[in-house]
Image: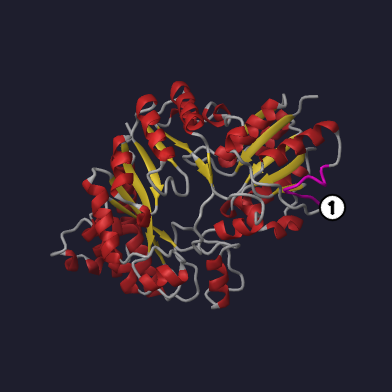
């Protein structure tokens, strides 16, 4: 029999959930009907009552976990369905299953686990023994990592793009690979590698033809003026795959694009290829200008000093490629000078737009363990907001105000002539949340829409 599967997220955001698109494609291959709902509208209970789904599949990260869990518990009291949750929250905090109210947690890569799960639900059979799943009766090991990736069906972009405003948005996001070689302490990649130890290669690529065909489909059916390639690291060297991709992309897509790179991998060979392919901007993470923090706290291990980082950022601009550079505020052992110093650093490096976020230690990361061991986290610590205030115990109010003001004003101040910046630094010690927030929002929106992404 055909069953109804409802995919739910807490918030839609401005980027399509590609993970859900893959699961929907799997379900449709089996002949089932799939639906999508974003709880931005706060009407999930009513929608479930009308649809009567057999399965509700939640995609959830740490930020939205409590919200999703609460909603599911309420709806479970009134409707009969099987609930399954996948995403970063269940993967990196599996011990929370017992209090989640979910029927199933899915850990790691979920496509083939979801396929088996749906087949069992359809047949009315137990799914307790399916790899990657946690149920009330069993915690299963994960299966081998999917390789080659091309064996997966094309993601069902129509599920979300065809039913939300995202279909009309000019920027579309794609992934050309899965996995990351690096072990930055604020990221869950190291934990992910431990989960999949001995289960295959962590870093895998789709074929060039597969990626370009996917882009062509979206370009043909939806608004698309700009492409964002959202791999953890798009390329490590100017290899055959990159050369083939640039050739096919330029020939068949030829839209400006943004991708993520590591500054320590950048060289002329890569930059010349990217520019040839119509690369408009690069997203790069420096995180901290303090070398000790970068190496010992964040495990960035870039093996280049600040002078060389500045030279490479300027080189990117020489190729006519804009730079969007990430920095973290409120890192353990950081001080006010570290935070303020990013402004002059960005000025020297001619950074197009420095993007600030607050350091947020997530469960399942080395940064969380470090902060816990050094008493930077309170006993009732909850994951904070990367766009908000620091909730690490080590900072006093003066430091928090400086951090917040740099978050709001840092990008704009980095454009001030170095000869005059000293006259503007006192603004960082002032406190005018509403005014500074308005400045940040307008400057941020303008730069992303017109400079970094060049949206029409």
Q: Which picture quadrant has residue 340?
A: bottom left
Question: Quick check: 277 left or right of 384?
Answer: left
Q: Residues within 10 Å of mark 1 (few under 14, many from 20)?
A: few
> What secondary structure do most residues of the magenta stretch adopt?
loop
Q: Residue at x 73, y 55 (%)?
A: 97
Q: Residue at x 41, y 68 (%)?
A: 294
Point out the stretch of residues depicted in magenta: 127-137
**Height in image: 301 above or below 107?**
below
Residue 383 locus on image (x, y percent) = 56, 61
Residue under label 1, please give it. Answer: 137
Q: Residue at x 42, y 39 (%)?
A: 240
Q: Nearer the viewer, residue 106 or 403?
A: 106
Per the image, is 130 magenta? yes
Placement of the N terminus among the 4 image quadrants: top right
Q: How is the image coloured?
A: secondary structure
Per the image, is 408 magenta? no
Question: Quick check: 179 left or right of 142?
Answer: left
In the orientation shown, which residue stands out farthest toward the front? 240
Residue 85 locus on image (x, y percent) = 68, 46
In the orientation shown, which residue stands out farthest toward the bottom? 374
**Height in image: 227 above or below 437?**
above
SS at badge 1 = loop
Placement of the C terminus among the 4 image quadrants: top left
Confirm whether residue 329 shows in the render: yes
Q: Which picture quadrant has residue 9?
A: top right
In the orientation shown, which residue stands out farthest toward the right? 125
Residue 103 locus on image (x, y percent) = 77, 47
Residue 215 locus on image (x, y percent) = 46, 29
Confirm whether residue 41 shows in the render: no
Q: Nearer the viewer, residue 37 or 116?
A: 116
């Amino acid at each position: 029999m055909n069953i109804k599967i409802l995919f739910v997220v807490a918030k839609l955001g401005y980027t399509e959930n590609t993970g859900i698109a893959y699961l929907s494609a799997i379900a449709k291959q089996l002949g089932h009907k799939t639906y999508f709902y974003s709880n931005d509208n706060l009407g999930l209970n009513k929608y479930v009552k009308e649809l009567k789904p057999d399965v509700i599949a939640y995609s959830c990260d740490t930020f939205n976990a409590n919200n999703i869990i609460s909603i599911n518990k309420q709806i479970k009291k009134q409707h009969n369905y099987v609930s399954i949750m996948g995403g970063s929250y269940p993967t990196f905090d599996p011990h929370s299953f017992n209090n989640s109210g979910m029927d199933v947690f899915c850990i790691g890569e979920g496509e083939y686990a979801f396929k088996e799960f749906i087949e069992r639900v359809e047949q009315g059979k137990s799914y307790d023994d399916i790899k990657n799943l946690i149920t009330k009766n069993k915690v299963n090991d994960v299966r081998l990592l999917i390789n080659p990736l091309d064996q997966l069906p094309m993601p069902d972009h129509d599920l979300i793009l065809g039913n939300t405003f995202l279909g009309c948005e000019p920027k579309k996001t794609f992934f050309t690979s899965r996995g990351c070689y690096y072990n930055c302490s604020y990221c869950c990649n190291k934990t992910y590698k431990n989960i999949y130890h001995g289960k295959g290669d962590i870093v895998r690529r789709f074929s060039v033809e597969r990626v370009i065909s996917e882009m062509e489909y979206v370009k043909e059916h939806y608004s698309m003026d700009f492409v964002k390639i959202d791999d953890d690291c798009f390329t490590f060297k100017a290899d055959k795959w990159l050369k083939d991709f640039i050739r096919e992309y330029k020939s068949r897509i030829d839209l400006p694009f943004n991708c993520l790179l590591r500054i320590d991998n950048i060289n002329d060979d890569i930059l010349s290829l990217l520019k040839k392919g119509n690369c408009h901007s690069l997203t790069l993470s420096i995180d901290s200008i303090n070398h000790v923090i970068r190496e010992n706290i964040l495990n960035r291990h870039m093996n280049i000093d600040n002078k060389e980082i500045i030279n490479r950022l300027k080189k990117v601009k020489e190729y006519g490629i804009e730079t969007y550079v990430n920095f973290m505020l409120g890192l353990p052992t950081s001080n006010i000078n570290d935070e303020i110093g990013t402004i002059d650093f960005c000025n020297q490096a001619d950074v197009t737009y420095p993007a600030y976020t607050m350091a947020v230690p997530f469960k399942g990361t080395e940064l969380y363990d470090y902060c816990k061991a050094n008493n930077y986290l309170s006993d009732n610590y909850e994951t904070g907001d990367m766009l908000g205030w620091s909730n690490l115990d080590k900072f006093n109010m003066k430091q928090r105000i400086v951090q917040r003001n740099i978050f709001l004003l840092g990008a704009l101040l980095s454009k001030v002539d170095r000869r005059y910046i000293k006259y503007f630094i006192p603004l960082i010690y002032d406190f005018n949340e509403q005014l500074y927030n308005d400045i940040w929002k307008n400057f941020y929106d303008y730069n992303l829409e017109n400079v970094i992404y060049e949206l029409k």
